[in-house]
Amino acid sequence: MILPYIKELAAGIEASLRSDPNQDSARKRFTLEIARLGIRLFSGEERVAWCGVFAPFDLLTAVGVTSCFAEFVGGWLATIGAVQPMLEKAEQAGYSTDSCSYHRGVIGAALEGMMPEPDFLIATSTPCSGGMATTENLSRHFSKDLFTIHIPRDDGPEGVKYLADQYRAMVDFVTAQIGQPMDAARLRQAMEKTNRARALLDEAYALAQAVPTPARRRDMSNLGIVLPLLFGSEAGIEVARAYRDEFARKVKAKIAGVPGERIRLMWLQNRIQFSNPLEQWLEEEHKAVLVFDELNQICWDPIDLEDPYIGLARRALSIPLGGPIERRIRNLQQHARAYRVDGAINPCHWGCRQGTGGRGLVERGLKEVGVPVLNLEVDCVDPRHFSEGQLRTRLEAFIEMIEGRGAGGARLEVAS
Amino acid sequence: MNTQTPQRMGFACAYTPLPIIDAAGFVPFRVLPMGDAPDQAGSFLHDNICPHVKRVLDRALGGDVPELAGVVLMNSCDAMRRVSDAWATARPADRVITLDLPIACDDTSVAHFKAELARLMERLSEWSGRPVTVEEVVQSVDRYNALAAGLERLADYAAVGALSGGHRVLQEIFNRSVTRSVDESLTELDRLAAGQGDSQQTDPGVPVLLFGNVLPDPEALELLEACGCRVVADDVCTGSRQLVCYQLDGQEDPLAQLAHAILSRPACARTLVSPQAGLLAGQVAARARECGAKGAIAHVMKFCDPYLARLPAIRDALREAGLPLLVLEGDCTLRSLGQHRTRIEAFVEMLGGSPP
């Protein structure tokens, strides 16, 4: 079921790009490259690894392994409206409805025989314990070896060394699994490509801060969490360049992603993955635009080509979700200022102890810089309990409160 | 003679290196998820966080902990990370150190955890005003090993119904063993051991293995016995998994040996061993077979991802061993367990026993 769907998706986008170049967009390029990745994952023709969210995918690319984080499948099934039977399958097998639905979705898909068998698996301790357990369960399901990466809390020299050593051990594990050594030249090329994609993406994010933002509603959805799957490859560079170029053109021409932008909002963690009208409603009714998604940021320096393992370790440790919450809060405060947001929405994904666990602390931290936070109760993957009316009411009250504070007025002239 | 009362050092996770805290002259004080502190943690953390962590934070917020010289927290799982995040905001005057706890026990992880233990020694030296030496840590390990061995003997008595007061008393002793000095606990164990000969063996009930994360309320254990269960072994981090022996060989690098011993202790659900999956399921099934249980009861904190995610595998492993499993989700209150009373009694009947 999945492979034909992805092939059809990729073919459709390719045909659209061929027939009408005016329809080209960075988002389309991104979707196409992810579809192509999906084809490689599901075709059964390549070496595949299912991983944790913060695994070094470019390192795996360098050694010739196609890899992806397991949660991607849960989110993607929700996007295409196919997640409900998978959730039910997992629940019937004993997986608690209190657990994360990204994880239940992928477990259900595995139990239904819809997940391609990997060559091995790599679990990461962050972003969450649930993800770690899910990777272990997939390892058990497929009877395939598991490698675990503990991403420490401390981003100092000891933490960096520890993580870099684990990456070296991971490469030993992977090369033993596939019977092929790591080629130093290929590793260097992959890191060069990662750095080029990084630089372009950094520019794109800086451009997205413009008032009005050049980003359309869905342009930035899942970008920062999914694009790393393409790091180390030409595809990653092409997608990042497409975003940079599109945003540069729009900013220069003062073209707003959402015409009439009045209210600028920050979205914490992941968007709601299944089809829902809330974002469109925010835009159309209130000209309220999601200008910044928390996971859309570059917080790491370029990888040192002479010592890539250290650079990769620093990259993983720089991700604010993994460290103490003060670091995450400082990071959110900085981005709130940089993007000039009027408010933040925290979807509080049910089942997430990582992103939403410290929501009270995040709320306090953002209030310190004058940014009000709306905590929603929502499951970003499971549509069964989606209460559109209740959510709309809360969002409406939040927007009214922001408008009451006088937000958006200064931008009206620029945006309209 | 030094008559000054030692200061208490708070902790919340069974992986905490208590011998180092003891060697620094502090009394390790486990902030157990008990008591009547009002529910305030929700203002810091989401309500869908593990009740263990919320109760610990409730106690901290409600002033339901004695004066603490500091707090040692472990980066063991999402919930423990969150309590580490929240504690500093909830009690900004407290001194807090959070130790990184690797998920595996390979050489790289042992080396990293050894460095973390050294960091703890350094920090506790600052807090206590005197240097903590490795020799002192080794001595404390010996004393804690004696305590762990004594508690294991008591648990054996309880398992055959020969501990006066049963598992309720055993749990009270378990709780005291992590809230007062190791010397006081050793003295109590000596006294109890001397009196064991007088204990009367009672109706033992149906033998079960109890496993899960935290169940510190002695009344909860009493309830299980009242329903006809005889807990012949447990794998609970407030029970027999709380204090375990750390074998050091007296040779070189004791700190590395301690790091290895802690990382290889009976696994909590958050621990993994590469490259095999399913460590916990195998561990629970093996324990159930070894102890002669007729069935197993899992008491799992609501929202505890590591356990919730492993229950299907554990159920499979127990099924293969021919052992039924009863899963009870709890929230650290006796109220939640009391609601399960009928299910526990039915489980006992299914295993061939009868509630008293």
Image: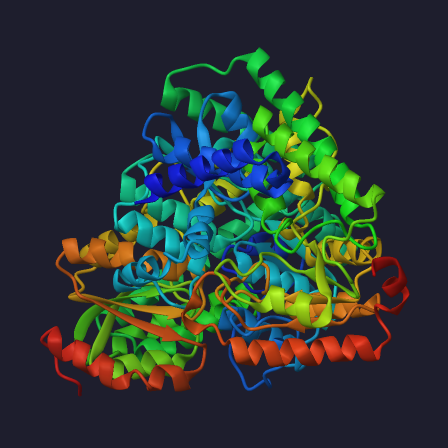
How is the model colour-coded? rainbow
Circle count: 0
In the image, is residue A205 above or below residue A257?
above
Q: Position of residue B293 (x, y in %)?
A: 18, 64
Q: Quadrant of the N terminus of chain B?
A: bottom right
Farthest residue, direction front: A19
- Examine the image and state in which quarter residue A288 appears: bottom right
Question: Would you say B153 lies left or right of A198 here?
Answer: left
Question: Would you say A142 lies left or right of A352 here?
Answer: left
Q: Quadrant of the C terminus of chain B?
A: bottom left
Between A310 and B26, the residue placed more toward the observer is: A310
Between B246 and A110, the residue placed more toward the observer is: A110
Residue B238 seen in the figure: yes
In the image, is residue A93 above or below residue A48?
below
Kindly identify the residue that appears in the image at 55 percent across and 48 percent down.
A126
Kindly identify the residue that appears in the image at 67 percent across and 35 percent down.
A242
Between A305 and A132, the residue placed more toward the observer is: A305
In the image, is residue A150 above or below residue B175?
above
- Examine the image and state in which quarter residue B301 appears: bottom left
Residue A56 seen in the figure: no
Q: Position of residue A402 (x, y in %)?
A: 78, 75
Kindly identify the residue that appears in the image at 36 percent across and 65 percent down.
A96
Between B20 and B350, the residue placed more toward the observer is: B350
- Examine the image and state in which quarter residue A318 appears: top right
